[in-house]
């Protein structure tokens, strides 16, 4: 019976190579999993303005946070931008992912680094450089429908 032994050098080289491979492949697998999870389309969300829980959206300038089925940790912000239109966007700041607040005086502010966005989710003051992720909204009568924006 032959006994296999590693020298200290072989052990360190093998262990180091394995650690490097894990460090490279691990994040790649997370990105693949994230890409797959995003491939499931979001079901449309309907908000009835007759529902007292949606009263904030009955007037221009009103805003509401609702649950995002795709990211339960960060809600969707819905704003009433005119008599006939609404906007909906992620509450996750595009700078470092902190949650943004509901609008105050028509300005949405990131709690962490003070980036500012308008009522449509467009960045107006950095450090964020990208607009908030938007959703498609339609208003028909007293119903607002929110859908995932197609790329």
Image (cartoon, helix red, strand yellow):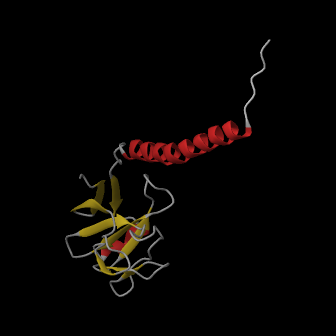
Identify which residue is drawn at 34% across, 65% down. 89
- Front position in the image: 106 or 84: 106
Query: Viewed as shown, does residue 48 lie left or right of 140?
Result: right
**60 over 69 or under it: above or below:** below
Figure quadrant of residue 123:
bottom left
- Identify the residue at horizontal 77%, vertical 15% (top origin): 2
* Residue 50 seen in this snapshot: no
Judging depth in this view, the residue of 142 and 151 nearest the camera is 151
Residue at far bottom of view:
105
In which quadrant of the rendered view does residue 137 lie? Answer: bottom left
Farthest top residue in view:
1
Residue 130 seen from this side? yes
Q: Between residues 11 and 140, which one lies in front from this camera angle? A: 11
Q: Is 146 in front, or is 109?
A: 109
Is 96 on the left or on the right of 125, as rendered?
right
User: Looking at the image, is 70 positioned above or below residue 90?
Assistant: above
Q: Which residue is at 39% across, 45% downward? A: 35
* Image position, residue 5 (x, y; %): 75, 27
Looking at the rendering, in which quadrant would you find the N terminus? top right
Count of numbered circles in the view: 0
Q: Position of residue 129 (x, y in %)?
A: 32, 74
Q: Residue at x 34, y 72 (%)?
A: 57
């Amino acid at each position: 019976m032959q006994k296999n032994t590693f020298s200290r050098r072989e052990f360190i080289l093998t262990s180091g190579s394995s650690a490097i491979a894990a460090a490279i492949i691990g994040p790649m697998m997370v990105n693949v999993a994230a890409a797959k999870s995003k491939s499931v389309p979001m079901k449309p969300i309907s908000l009835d303005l007759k529902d007292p829980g949606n009263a904030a959206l009955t007037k221009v300038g009103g805003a509401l946070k609702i649950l995002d089925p795709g990211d339960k940790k960060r809600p969707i912000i819905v704003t009433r931008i005119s008599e006939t239109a609404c906007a909906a966007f992620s509450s996750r700041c595009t700078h470092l992912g902190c949650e943004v607040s509901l609008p105050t005086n028509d300005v949405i502010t990131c709690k962490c680094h003070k980036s500012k966005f308008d009522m449509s989710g467009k960045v107006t003051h950095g450090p964020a450089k990208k607009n908030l992720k938007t959703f498609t909204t339609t208003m028909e009568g007293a119903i607002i429908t929110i859908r995932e924006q197609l790329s």
